[in-house]
Image: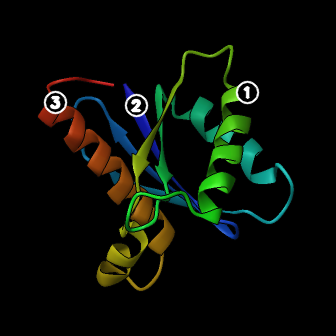
């Protein structure tokens, strides 16, 4: 299994990668999110190239678990991704991304988006381990 973590933003999309054996998330890349569907097509290319089996998308909720304006944008992007992957054997899951971007800024000054994606993905992997399940 290969996992791809996604930190969706209106300007940039951070990506992180982990494989099933190690289950350690590492920052991968940052895609500019500037043209309609351009980032989606680049993301699909990475999914196919890296033989991704599970895409974990950071789900932005407010401090009290409420939906935010960004939540809807992430849901819309994820729906578009799911439509493109409908005939592929790729699972998509959400992981709460609360504080992932601010936490990543504590560790790095650049590449914040890909580090945030790694934090999201690692959180998902750790949760799977605690529950004794795999994705």
Measured in 3D between alpha carbons, the distance from the residue under mark 2 to the one under mark 3, in whole angstroms, is: 19 Å
Specify the label residue 42 is tagged with.
none
Q: In the rendering, which numbered label is found on residue 131?
A: 3
User: Can you say whether 72 is above or below 126 in the image?
Assistant: below
Front-most of residues 69 and 20: 69
Image quadrant containing the C terminus: top left
The coloring applied to the image is rainbow
Tag shown at residue 83? 1
Mark nearer the N terminus (3 vs 1): 1
Residues at marks 3 and 1, CA–CA distance in whole angstroms: 29 Å
Can residue 88 be seen? yes
Give x and y (percent) for residue 92.
Answer: 51, 31
**Disc 2 residue crowd, few under 14, some 14–19, many 20+, Cα 10 Å:** some
The percent position of residue 133, horizontal first and vertical second, equals 21, 23
Above or below residue 58? Residue 34 is below
Q: Position of residue 60 (x, y in %)?
A: 49, 59
- Point 36% across, 81% down: residue: 108
Residue neighbourhood size for the residue with mark 3, other residues' Cα within 10 Å, grouped as few (<14), some (14–19), many (≥20): few
Say which residue label 2 marks: 2
């Amino acid at each position: 299994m290969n996992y791809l973590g996604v930190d969706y933003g209106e300007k940039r999309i951070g990506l992180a990668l982990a494989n099933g054996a190690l289950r350690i998330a590492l920052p991968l890349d940052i895609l500019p999110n500037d043209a309609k569907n351009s980032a989606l097509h680049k993301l699909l290319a990475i999914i196919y190239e890296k033989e991704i089996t599970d895409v974990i998308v950071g789900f932005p909720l407010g401090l009290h678990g409420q939906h935010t304006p960004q939540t809807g944008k992430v849901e819309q992007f994820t729906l578009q991704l799911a439509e493109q992957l409908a005939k592929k054997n790729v699972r998509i899951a959400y992981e709460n991304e609360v504080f992932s971007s601010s936490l990543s800024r504590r560790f790095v000054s650049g590449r914040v988006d890909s580090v945030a994606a790694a934090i999201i993905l690692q959180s998902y992997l750790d949760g799977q381990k605690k529950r004794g399940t795999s994705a």
